[in-house]
Amino acid sequence: MDLQQQRRRLTEMQGQLEKRSNEEYRENLRDYHHELSVTDNHPADVASEDYLRNLDASFQENDQLLLEKIQKALVRIDHGEYEDCTECGAKIDPKRLEALPYAATCAECANREAADPGKSRSYPDEGDFTWPKFNQYGTASGAGEQPRPDQR
């Protein structure tokens, strides 16, 4: 397998995801609704907009996960571990890496994880998972609701 070609593919994928992330996900709620006020909208219109906003957030989270996988794959290339499964240490089939260049596991380990997913790997082992993500936008305009200086 040509590792330099795989590096180029991964770097290109990384660039595309970063570009898309910078362009598409920088809208705030008012820009997303394309109106100055959402209070005069029909509740179904607001619900549709809310659904689409949540869908975009899901796409953004998926892009972040893919970026992390790509970055880890690039590090594995640098350390000479790109073709080794991170779970069992066996060689990953070159066809699998050709189809999924950021794959970290062999097909057998991936199938085992899919059959018994257990706890999602996208979440940390402990702690609050969603509040920090939403808290960055603030919850009110009052001074008591603003993030502390050490949290910025």
Image (spheres, rainbow, N blue to C red):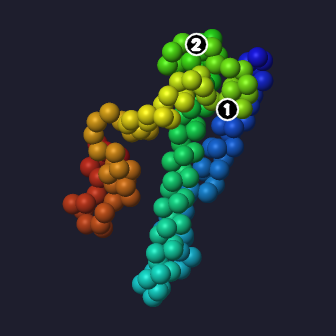
Vertical placement of 108 versus 35: above or below? above
In this view of the protein, which residue sits in the foreground, 63 or 23? 63
Q: Position of residue 65 (x, y in %)?
A: 53, 40
Amino acid type at circle 2 is: Ala
Element type where label 1 sits in the image? loop
Mark 2 = which residue? 90
**Residue in view at x 54 percent, y 46 percent:** 62
- Label 2 neighbourhood size at 10 Å, few (<14), some (14-19), many (20+)? some
- Label 1 neighbourhood size at 10 Å, few (<14), some (14-19), many (20+)? few
| First in sequence: mark 1 vs mark 2 | 2
**Residue in view at x 58 percent, y 38 percent:** 66
Horizontally, residue 84 falls left or right of residue 28, namely right
Q: Position of residue 3 (x, y in %)?
A: 73, 18
**Residue in view at x 54 percent, y 34 percent:** 68
- Mark 1 and 2 residues: CB-CB less than 8 Å, in contact? no
Amino acid type at circle 1 is: Leu
**Residue in view at x 21 percent, y 60 percent:** 144
In this view of the protein, which residue sits in the foreground, 115 or 50? 115
The disc placed on residue 63 is none
Vertical placement of 127 versus 44: above or below? above
Quadrant where the N terminus is found in the figure:
top right
Mark 1 = which residue? 100
Horizontally, residue 61 falls left or right of residue 80, namely left
Q: Is residue 24 visible?
A: yes
In this view, which residue lies farthest toward the front?
A: 115
